């Protein structure tokens, strides 16, 4: 696994309100999002996502009432679906816990969720709509409109 984080997702109560806050402090929203999720390009090819807390919990196969659900996930984007399978298996072999086996997603990608031994959640994902640079950093499209 390349030592990088591609995406930090914050599970929020109100996507529009959270998006407006981050825009007020100077973050530039990408055109990649919609009413349910906002993406912000950060320096170094990192992306911040704001997504409804319930949606994030459901996507990782969790419940927001579960003890230990922090409303945050780290993501490592890959160049292929095969690499997702390989990295999820490596996490588990190294002592991590499988939360959700890799599968095709509703948004057209492929991802799975694992937790490290301390319970920190990682999404391992392939997004065929996002370009990765030579270092693995995500390059989002500019905001539309």
Image (tube, rainbow, N blue to C red):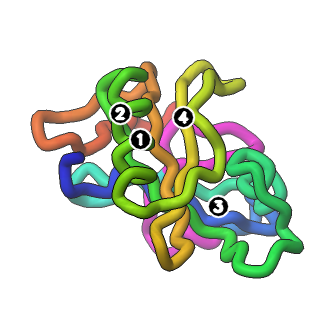
Instruction: Find out whether the residues at labels 2 and 1 contact each other: C-beta distance under 8 Å.
Output: yes
Instruction: Find out whether the residues at labels 3 and 4 contact each other: C-beta distance under 8 Å.
Output: no
The CA distance from mark 2 to mark 1 is 5 Å
Q: Can residue 68 be seen in this view?
A: yes
Numbered mark located on residue 119 in the image? none
Numbered mark located on residue 89 in the image? 1
Q: How many marks?
A: 4
Numbered mark located on residue 19 in the image? 3
Residue 96 at x, y = what percent? 46, 61
Residue 98 at x, y = what percent? 58, 51
Which residue is depicted at the point 53% across and 54% down? 114
Residue 112 at x, y = what percent? 56, 40
The CA distance from mark 1 to mark 4 is 12 Å
Q: SS class of the residue under badge 1?
A: helix
Q: Is residue 145 visible?
A: no
Which residue is depicted at the point 76% across and 42% down? 35
Q: Mark 2 points at which residue?
A: 86
The CA distance from mark 1 to mark 3 is 34 Å
The crowd level at tag 4 (other Cα within 10 Å; few <14, some 14-19, many 20+) is: many
Nearer-N-terminus badge (3/4): 3
Is 53 in front, or is 34?
Answer: 53
The crowd level at tag 1 (other Cα within 10 Å; few <14, some 14-19, many 20+) is: some
Tell me the mark number nearer the camera, choosing from 2 and 4: 2
Tell me the mark number nearer the camera, choosing from 1 and 4: 1
Numbered mark located on residue 111 in the image? 4
Q: Left or right: where does residue 10 sit relative to residue 28?
A: right
Magenta segment range? 20-39
Instruction: Find out whether the residues at labels 3 and 2 contact each other: C-beta distance under 8 Å.
Output: no
- Examine the structure image and report whether residue 64 is included in the region drawn in magenta: no
Q: SS class of the residue under badge 4?
A: strand
Q: Left or right: where does residue 129 sit relative to residue 17?
A: left
Residue 139 at x, y = what percent? 30, 37
């Amino acid at each position: 696994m390349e030592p990088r984080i591609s995406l930090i997702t914050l599970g929020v109560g109100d996507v529009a309100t959270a998006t407006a806050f981050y825009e007020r402090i100077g973050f530039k929203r990408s055109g990649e999002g919609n009413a349910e999720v906002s993406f912000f390009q950060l320096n170094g090819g990192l992306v911040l996502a704001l997504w409804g807390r319930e949606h994030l919990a459901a996507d990782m196969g969790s419940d927001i009432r579960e003890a230990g659900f922090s409303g945050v996930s780290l993501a490592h984007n890959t160049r292929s679906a095969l690499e997702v399978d390989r990295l999820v298996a490596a996490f588990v072999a190294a002592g991590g816990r499988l939360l959700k086996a890799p599968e095709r997603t509703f948004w057209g990608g492929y991802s799975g969720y694992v937790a490290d031994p301390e319970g920190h959640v990682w999404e391992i994902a392939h997004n065929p709509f996002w370009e990765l640079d030579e270092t693995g950093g995500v390059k989002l499209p500019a905001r539309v409109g």
